[in-house]
Structures are given as structure tokens and as C-alpha cells.
Image: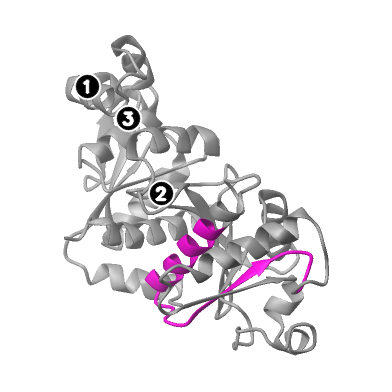
Amino acid sequence: MWTIKEIENKIKLVEKKQKIVFPEGNQLKIQENAQFLVEQNLAKPILLFNSRKEVPSNLNEKIEVVVLEEYNKEEMIEVFLEVRKGKLDKPTAVELLKQKTYFGVLMMKLNLADAMICGLEYTTADTLRPALQVIKTSPEYSIASSVFLMSKDENIYLFTDCALNVDPTSQQLADIASMAANFAKQLNEDDVQVAMLNYSTKGSGMGPSVEKVKEAVEILKTKNTKGILFDGEMQFDSAFDKSVRDKKYPESKITKEHANVYVFPDLNSGNIGYKIAQRLGNYQAAGPFILGLNKPVNDLSRGATLEDIKQTSIITIFTSMFNGGNK
């Protein structure tokens, strides 16, 4: 897979720049990130503010500023009511559009922005609820999911789903695996090998979680997954270490030393797993990136560093180009 730096360099070569809306324009790290994006010629950032007095006087003139209290929202309200037909009345729509996350996704719906990033102030639920209601999931998948890009030196792996779905069904787990695998292909991995994780390696354990993963693997066998290999159920050591895999699961289809993509059976194990890799293994955890939406909306950890925000922005810009933003 391409490194973050390689992706950044490829974005610079594209003439048409993506418009990325940041609802938390009042946050200093968001302003610094927007400065980075325009200085490096990576994107056209749009910062949202509630009032004019919140807008810093020293912002780069290439950064677009939108002040909600000054904006004529009539067209947005009409589109919002149409999208949520029968589920929303006009007074409620007016109130919701005072929230910058709803305003941001309506900008995307009106093609005034190509993608959205936030999360320093807003929870994951507050970020994704407007996206799911307005941008909605792709008809190809039953749900949206999340993926972390775990990197250390030249090693890059994808962990999914570590931020969104609490206890996915077998069908949902298959969709989660497919989304992450396709994301890996977008990042230039032409030989994607996906490990479906569990506490059991090919029947060594029993229980509902084991059966769920087995069924997900069977579902994946029916899909057209050219250039993608799915295997499991298997424990993490079997998936990550070929010498262990050769002992525990010699008939495994995974041929690489390490699988590229690791699919956790539930949110509990996924969230714990990525944080262990991050804190004990010193892996950089970029994301979570939300997969399965019609346009990219990505969430930041409320403790995200400026470097985290830059990396999330670069990946968001790149994936936005696959969603029609560069056509």
C-alpha cells in the first residue's frame, strides 16, 4: 500500500482540488491544518463558523470561510426536507441546520463540498448521524463501517471495524470486510489478503462468535472479489505470523507473511486491538475512516493531534477523488 507521503504526492499532481468542509472552524488545530492544505496545494478547505466574530483575522485568504448566521439557508432547508421526506418538518430542519455538522453534510449534498472531517468537538454519533441521514450509505452495502490505517516505518495494515458497529451480524461482517478490502485496493494494494479474526483458528474454539465469523467467510465466498482473498476464522497470531499460521492452519489461503487487512468480530475487540497496537506497539493510527457512505465523511478522535488531522485529511482527499470528485 502507498504510504501517506506517497498519497500526498499523488494528490499534488491532480489539477482539480477537492473541497473539504471542516465544521469545527473555530478549533486552532483545524485552522493550522487548513493552512497546511493550502500551502501544500492539496485541497480547498472550507471552515464553518457560527458568527463573524469567531473568524480569525489572520486566516490565509485561500481558505474559504462560511458563517452560518449570515448564510441564506432556504435552498438547504428545501433539500433537507426532500431528503428526509415524511421524517422532518420545516421548524425542525431550521433548528438542525444551526448545527455545523448538518450544515456541512448539506453543503456536500448541494455539491458545495466534496467531503467533511470533524470530531474534535463532536462525538462520533454526532458526526455520523447527519451523514447517514443526508449522504446515506451506498446501495452496495447494508451498513457503514470504519477502518484505521495502522502504520509503523514501512509497515501498513488496515484494522476494521474499530469505531462504529457494536456487534455486526454475519452479513454485516462480510460487508465490513469487503469495504476494508476495497479501501486497501484504493490505496494501491493489488494483492489484498484479509484475515477474519476470532479467538478460534479454523475450529479450535466454539461459540456464537466463531459461528458468526465462519458464516461471514461463507458469504464472502459468494461475492465477486477479484484480487481479494478472505480467510478465517483465525486468531491474530495466525493471521500476522506465517510460522504460527503454518502450524495452526497449514491449509490457509493467506500466502503473505502478514495479512493486509484484519477484520475484528465486534467493536469491543476491534477498539481494544487498535489501541493496543497504537500504545504498546507504537503504531500510528490514522482514522477512523468511514466506509460505505456515498461521499466521504470522516471522524476525528477528540484527542487528535495536528499530525493525526493532517493524515486524516490526506486520506479523505484521496478517497474523495474516487467518489466522483475528480470527474
- Type of the residue with mark 3: Phe
Name the disc covering residue 103, or none. 3
Q: Quadrant of residue 224?
A: bottom left
Query: Which of the numbered marks, if any, corresponds to residue 32?
Result: 2
Q: Earlier in the sequence, mark 2 or mark 3?
A: 2
Coordinates of residue 248 in the picture (x, y in percent): 79, 83
Q: Is there CB contact under 8 Å for labels 3 and 1?
A: yes
Going by the numbered disc 2, the residue's amino acid type is Glu
Label 2 secondary element = helix
Mark 3 Cα-neighbour bin, 10 Å: few <14, some 14–19, many ≥20: many
Q: Within the magenta stretch, is there residue 182?
A: yes
Q: CA distance from mark 3 to mark 1?
A: 9 Å
Task: Please say whether residue 42 is one of the residues in the magenta stretch.
Answer: no
Tell me which corner region of the image, top left, top right, bottom left or bottom right, holds residue 285: bottom right
Residue 274, percent from left and from top: 67, 60
Image location of residue 221, percent across then percent down? 52, 71
Residue wearing tag 1: 73
Residue that appears at 63% across and 82% down: 258
Q: Nearer the viewer, mark 2 or mark 1?
A: 1
Look at the image and give the residue range highlighted in magenta: 174-201
The location of residue 102, given as percent across then percent down, is 36, 29
Q: Along the horizontal axis of the image, is 309 left or right of 103? A: right
- Check the image and report above or below for 84 versus 207: above
